[in-house]
Image: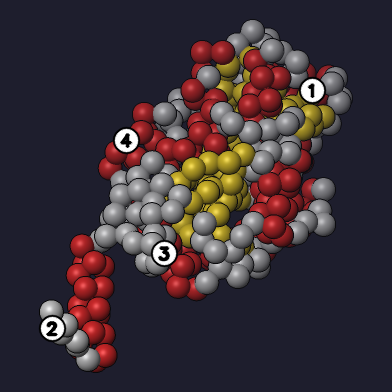
């Protein structure tokens, strides 16, 4: 048998053509480009069932589609210390290879990096996109004697320090809403930091605290067990059109506690991977089925690109530095 040989240049030309055809067909192969079909983790710094965990699972539903990331995303939970446990791990130990993301919460991680000695801050994390913005709401149990903000504050006036208000932890959005509420109302109130939003909500439902600040999304889903007295935002929310803002109730609280949520990777992740994910993640959040699921579960959506998130982070860093100097 006569064996036919081809030149090295011919071989390379054929290999290049095959590679182009494989890439054009979207076929994954063992030594292919990122992500190569390999699953990607997304760390949530809060427990299962809370708003961040719940929404992260919805927001990443479409990740496996070729039009988006092209790989499935799985969620891991590392709760504790109002998010600090998970974010400290993420900033210092998570692999910077594109296969481990984390959900961020603003103002939470920014406020904590200002107040505490954390391993994370806006300079060592790389945002990819934002899926939602969830205002804090002031809630009481359905059996509470308080039906309005004014009634709650009248009780606080008559009983200084007796009104207890729960939130998901220290220097999370709920705590910032509380600090603003206490300062603007001029009343002596007591903050009860819980072990995450689910625990904070439980304290209110059980009547173990006078009231609570919690996520609009979680509170709207639990509306049968609660009375929602006000929204800590600059305007009413379409999900709760009959609920006043705190400003409408006479308490000058703005939108500083609104909880922005999205995905990020650690600093040091290769720039080509950051760029790839930044081009895909906002589009993934905007998937038609994903948006339908967000709306049906009262999960407020606000999609921002990487550049828009970077701007938002810097603005919040400046604002919170001033706010917390006078409130902590």
Mark 2 vs mark 3, foreground winner is: 2
Where is mark 3, residue-wise? 34
Indicate which disc residue 80 carries: none
Q: Are marks 2 and 4 in contact (CB under 8 Å)?
A: no
Indicate which disc residue 292 carries: 4
First-in-chain label (2 vs 4): 2
Q: Residue at x 75, y 59 (%)?
A: 119
Say above or below: 217 vs 131: above
Where is mark 1, residue-wise? 163
Mark 2 vs mark 4, foreground winner is: 2
Nearest the camera: 187 or 17?
A: 17
Residue at the left extreme of this rendering: 1
Number of labels in the image equals 4
Q: CA distance from mark 3 to mark 4?
A: 29 Å
Indicate the secondary structure of the residue bearing disc 4. helix
In the figure, residue 168 lies in which quadrant? top right
The image shows residue 232 at horizontal and vertical percentages of 59, 38
Residue at the right extreme of this rendering: 160
């Amino acid at each position: 048998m006569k064996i036919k040989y081809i030149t090295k240049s011919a071989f390379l030309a054929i290999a290049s053509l095959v590679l182009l055809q494989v890439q054009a067909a979207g076929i994954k192969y063992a030594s292919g480009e990122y992500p190569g079909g390999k699953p990607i983790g997304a760390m949530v710094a809060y427990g299962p069932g809370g708003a961040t965990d719940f929404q992260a699972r919805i927001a990443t539903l479409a990740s496996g589609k070729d039009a988006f990331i092209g790989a499935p995303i799985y969620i891991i939970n590392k709760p504790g210390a109002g998010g600090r446990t998970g974010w400290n791990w993420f900033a210092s130990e998570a692999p910077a290879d594109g296969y481990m993301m984390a959900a961020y919460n603003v103002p939470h991680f920014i406020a904590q990096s200002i107040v505490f000695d954390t391993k994370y801050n806006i300079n060592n994390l790389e945002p990819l996109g934002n899926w939602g913005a969830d205002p804090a709401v002031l809630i009481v149990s359905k059996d509470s004697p308080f039906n309005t903000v004014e009634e709650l504050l009248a009780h606080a006036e008559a009983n200084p320090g007796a009104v207890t208000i729960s939130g998901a932890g220290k220097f999370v959005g709920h705590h910032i809403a509380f600090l603003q509420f206490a300062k603007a109302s001029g009343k002596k109130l007591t903050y009860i930091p819980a072990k995450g939003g689910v625990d904070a909500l439980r304290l209110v439902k059980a009547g173990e605290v006078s009231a609570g600040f919690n996520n609009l999304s979680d509170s709207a889903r639990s509306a049968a067990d609660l009375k929602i007295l006000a929204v800590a935002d600059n305007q009413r929310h379409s999900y709760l059109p009959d609920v006043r803002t705190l400003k409408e109730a006479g308490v000058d609280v703005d939108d500083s506690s609104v909880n922005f949520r999205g995905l990020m990777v650690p600093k040091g992740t290769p720039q080509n991977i950051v760029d790839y994910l930044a081009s895909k993640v906002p589009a993934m959040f905007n998937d038609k089925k994903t948006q339908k699921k967000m709306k049906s579960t009262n999960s407020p959506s606000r999609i921002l690109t990487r550049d828009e998130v970077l701007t938002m982070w810097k603005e919040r860093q400046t604002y919170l530095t001033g706010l917390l100097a006078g409130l902590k």
